[in-house]
Structure formats: C-alpha cells, structure tokens
C-alpha cells in the first residue's frame, strides 16, 4: 500500500513560558483589517517527524530551542482554501528568547486572555479546548 500524503502537514507549537503564557504570532504580511493571530507553525517536510519539524521551525523561525513535551493527534482544517493536517505540540523553551523572524509580531498571551485576540479559524477550536482544561 503506497504511503502517499494527500494533504500538507504543519507542526504547530503551543509554546509555554515559565508563567504559563503562550506564544502567539501575527503572520506577515498582515492586512491591518484582518489581524488574525496564530500559534507558531510551519510545514512538516517529507520524511520528517512532527516533533523534529517543531524543533526545526522553532529554531529557524523564532531562534529558540524547544522541548516537545507532548504532541496531539492530527487535526484536519482548511487554511486559505486548502485542506491541511495540523499537529499541535505543547513545548517549553530550552534556550533563547523568541524573535519575530517571519512574523509581523509575536507576543506572550496568558491562557485566560486568548479570547481577546482574533485568531484564524484553525486556532479557535484549540483555544476553546485550552480554556476548558
């Protein structure tokens, strides 16, 4: 049976700081009328595990080293009209201070304040789940 990937996969970091705030990012470029926040994410390359991809993305995009604490099962979502697989991972920072890199802006948001931000549609169910736990 061929092992073909039918949709792109992305590793998504729920990167937590010592005070339990989560790192959120505003992709660039961003239309100021549609400021939709996301959790830092990037494409999983062919043959790469989601955990390895998350560590690479954190290093390349944010200039931090993360420890993947636990990964979640894949979630299928539609982003920009394309069906994708999202692999959310809870992470802690081992070294470095996050740098915005490819993002227009990053910030630390306490979990209880996540609803104050406008997130993309793929992130909203995850935020609701986070606030229930």
Image (spheres, rainbow, N blue to C red):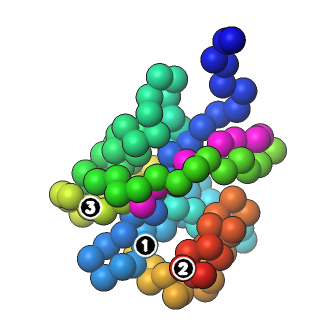
Mark 2 surroundings: few (<14), some (14-19) or many (≥20) residues within 10 A: few
Q: What residue span does the magenta drawing correspond to?
A: 82-90
Which quadrant would residue 99 be assigned to in this image?
Answer: bottom left
Q: Quadrant of the N terminus?
A: top right
Contact between marks 3 and 2 (CB within 8 A): the answer is no
Which of pointers 1 and 2 indicates the residue nearer the eye?
2
Front residue of 34/22: it is: 22
The reply, left or right, for residue 116 in relation to residue 77 is: left
Label 3 element class: strand
Magenta-drawn stretch contains 87 = yes
Q: Look at 61% across and 47% down and name the residue there.
A: 74
Residue beneath disc 1: 22
Q: Look at 73% across and 63% down and name the residue there.
A: 121
Magenta stretch, main secondary structure class: strand
- Residue 133's mark? 2
Q: Look at 35% across and 57% down and name the residue there.
A: 69
Residue beneath disc 3: 93
Sequence-earlier tag: 3 or 2: 3
Q: In whole angstroms, how far apart are the C-alphas of marks 1 and 3?
A: 11 Å
Residue 51 in view (yes/no): yes
Contact between marks 1 and 3 (CB within 8 A): the answer is no
Mark 1 surroundings: few (<14), some (14-19) or many (≥20) residues within 10 A: many
Label 2 element class: loop
- Residue 94's mark? none
Q: Please say if 72 is above or below 132.
A: above
Mark 3 surroundings: few (<14), some (14-19) or many (≥20) residues within 10 A: some
């Amino acid at each position: 049976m061929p092992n073909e990937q039918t949709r792109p996969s992305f590793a998504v970091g729920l990167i937590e700081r010592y005070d339990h705030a989560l790192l959120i990012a505003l992709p660039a470029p961003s239309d100021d009328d549609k400021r939709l926040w996301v959790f830092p994410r990037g494409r999983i390359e062919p043959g790469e595990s989601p955990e390895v991809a998350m560590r690479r993305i954190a290093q390349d995009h944010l200039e931090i080293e993360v420890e993947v604490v636990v990964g979640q099962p894949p979630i299928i979502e539609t982003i920009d009209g394309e069906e994708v697989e999202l692999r959310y991972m809870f992470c802690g920072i081992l070294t470095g201070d996050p740098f915005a890199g490819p993002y227009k802006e990053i910030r630390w948001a306490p979990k209880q304040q996540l609803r104050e931000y406008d997130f993309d549609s793929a992130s909203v169910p995850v935020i609701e789940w986070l606030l229930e736990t």
